[in-house]
Image (cartoon, helix red, strand yellow):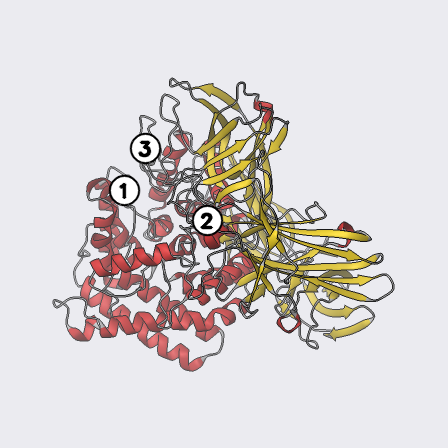
Amino acid sequence: MELARLRTLNRIEPLGIDQTPEFSWMLRSSARDTVQSSYRIVVTAGPLTVWDSGRVDSDAQSFIAYAGEPLRSRTEYRWTVTVTDNHGHTASASAGFETALFADDWRAQWAESTIPRPAAEGWGHGTQPPAVEFLRDFRLDGAVRRARLYATALGAYRLTVNGVRPDDRELAPEFSVYRSRLYVQTYDVTAFLRVGGNELSMYVGDGWYHCPVTRPLSHAQRETPAVLFQLELEYADGTTQIVSSDDAVTCRTGPVQSSDLYWGERYDATAIPSVAQRARVVNLGYDNLVAQPLEPIRAVAVLPAVSLHIAPSGDRIIDFGQIVAGRVRVRIDAPHGTEVALEHFEATTPDGEYFNGTLAGQKDVYVSDGKPQIYEPIFTFHGFRYLRVTGLEAIDLADFEAVVLSTPKDSAGSFESSDARLNRLHENVVWSQRNNTMSIPTDCPTREKAGFTGDIQMYAPAAYANEDMTSFLEAWLRNLEADQLPDGVVPMTVPFTTLYESLSLRMSAQFGTTGVTGIAGWSDAAVIVPWEIYRATGSTAVLERSYASMKAWCDSVIDTARHMRGSDDIPEELDRHLWNTGFHFGEWLIPSQHQKEGDWDNTRSSAFYVAPFFGYRSLSLFAQVARLLDRDADHHRYLEEAEATKAAIQRVFMSADELPTPLMGGYVLAFAFGLVPDERRMAYGAKLVSILDDNDGLLDTGFVATPYLLDVLVEIGRPDLAVGLVWEDRMPSWLYQVDQGATAIWENWDAIAPDGMPTTSSLDHYAFGAVDDWITREIAGIQAAAPGYKRIVIAPRTDVPLTFCARTLLTPYGEVGIHWTTESLDVTIPANTTAVVHWGGDVHAVGSGSYHF
């Protein structure tokens, strides 16, 4: 038996944390039926032991909270865990973490640019102001034994020490609710310093903070870039020194003449840096500073160019073969003054022409100084598969690479089957997830780049099937709490920006309400996302941390239903329990409504059931959370509210054998949320099937109902219809996208028409990729019988058009693996878990190990 995958706060050896550590590990054993019987954790700081848990007789191996003496700022710690299993085997392993610079230890001052900053001319390429480089010179009198730099900025920055980048992170300090959660990065810069003169540089572009599209909500928004850094040095002789941002910082402009996350970057290699001038010291305080709680954005893959074609217009277009989020790295050798334009886009027209269906230009420009250079933008990223290149006399494909940016996360598994199209569908899901988990969960990497709350709440289960999302989603939930309004309302995007605040206010006014109001299926992320993390990990700690936010959102739903009358046709004693007022997206992008009414009309036609149904969903889930956490008073209160809502829904919507809507999603959500009365189940199931039949066997669900559609068909006894929808290839369907050459999941079911013409919707939107969760559970057959996969069910569905299927899935206990054919099943169950295997009509109870049936 051995220990593996040691994690602190679900991260590998994190550098710079300010949270109470939680420790996790996995057991690996060659013996079957291995179960952990005890553990002991010892945490040390140098020679000192700061916590010894003692022997704990427990099988817990994840999210074990540190309970020692208070952690010190800027300190390296090691922890060692020793585990004994039920076979008497013992194993130990160690890992480390380092604390950040805590609030009381900041000595640095904010340094703000004093360079006149012209206003942007609008959302157009090249109109954003130049990036600003902040410089701090300093001298070292001897050899340095240890050096840590703590830094952040208003704007996106790139750090160098003596001209060298100390790590490979991109777009720091990333996207967060800046007024209360500005991330601070910790760097080990020991190896980059030298005796004598040194220079520290922070090159700052607009980033999310200054970009017009992502401008944050803030009462103290700064109009110019600013930096904060503190370099802590320990010399070989034991003496110390601090170098920080202060009135010695200077600033200047350089080659980045314009930077914009949406429109792109203009890099002029001929530009002469401006004369450095003294930066301005400003008092912005430290109250909003937090150590970055997730891995930094990095380049996670590099793809070579696949082909070059000349469009009928004469445009030269490079194809990378895959939609990605990131930027292009290109070798340029052109005469002095040559402007090379790189325009990024997702799809060509049927005849191979450039087509940009986004609101963003996604155009980078490089002005050559006549010397061969490798150019890669610094302060922007794009969503693209294709690149239109102008300005170069000749194009060599070997000079072009696509650099994929994302927040790195542990891969949670693999999928392969005998159907190449199903494999491609899975790959499309994985790519959309990779492309849309850069700092925050986004809807698309092109025209919006926004943290829409609805998209991640509906996709979270599928996300966990592909990557370990815990630290990433927990960081986002802390931002959600920070953006939650005093009345408990959760906005449509997190972080909430001035753009989406304006949209929210306009939409509220159209629907008869004022202010920013909750949106069904979107704002419910406050409850559903923590719940899905709990289901995937088994950790109640996330529920504890999100409890106040969850409760505030549920109170908002209750108060809105109670104090805002939805319909005079509904008796007041029922209406007061129904959340049925204000603006809602409804199901959003229902195929039939999208083609017939348009998406905004669809919000009205489906919101009347989506809002009360999701209101019940949040209340009922929160009642379960309160019970799990032994909050008895809250459990009884919110259970009572949920049951009152359910009773009102059933009396208002379900007094007949048909719902008052012909929409497929109404029936799907009613079944999925357990709202259908027993006496209506047969009639509603038959009605759902008839709607599907009337639609020629094609799905007709939007964002919030599609994740539940296949499970509901199984629930009503029609798994054949669920399987049929997975293998459907007419529009709208998942395999229609594959057949149209999709390399990511589309926002709209009809994002590319049968004739190959793209529309203005995104081709990289993971929401409808929620189907990957069903494929994992039903076709591969890996299901959690208890939160966190402590108990597992293996039950592959073999009544599908496959001859084999293989899936691995990373759980908190280790990797579950299956490989089934029409003749046999191979299963791997991780240590410290048990499983029930259904195969060939038999049921087998097994412990950990590998099995062949």
Question: Which residue is situated farthest in the right direction here?
Answer: 237
Question: Which residue is situated farthest in the bottom direction here?
Answer: 633
Label annotation for residue 773: 2
Q: Is residue 547 above or below residue 395?
A: below
Alpha carbon of mark 3 to alpha carbon of mark 2: how far?
22 Å
Q: Secondary structure at mark 2?
A: helix
Amino acid under disc 3: Arg
Residue 194: horizontal and vertical position, in percent?
80, 51
Q: Earlier in the sequence, mark 3 or mark 2?
A: 3
Camera-nearest label, 3 or 1 = 1
Which quadrant does the N terminus fall into?
A: bottom right
Q: Earlier in the sequence, mark 2 or mark 1?
A: 1
The reply to whether dot 2 and dot 1 touch (C-beta < 8 Å) is no
Q: Is residue 717 left or right of residue 744?
A: left
Residue 444: horizontal and vertical position, in percent?
42, 45
Query: Which residue lies under the disc numbered 1?
Result: 591
Q: Nearer the viewer, residue 417 or 466?
A: 466
Q: Earlier in the sequence, mark 3 or mark 1?
A: 1
Amino acid under disc 1: Pro
Q: Secondary structure at mark 1?
A: helix
Alpha carbon of mark 2 to alpha carbon of mark 1: how far?
22 Å
Q: Secondary structure at mark 3?
A: loop
Q: Residues within 10 Å of mark 3 (few under 14, many from 20)?
A: some
Q: Residues within 10 Å of mark 1 (few under 14, many from 20)?
A: many
Query: Which residue lies under the disc numbered 3?
Result: 730
Q: Is residue 781 above or below residue 697?
A: below
Residue 280, by quadrant, is: bottom right
In this orientation, does residue 293 appear? no
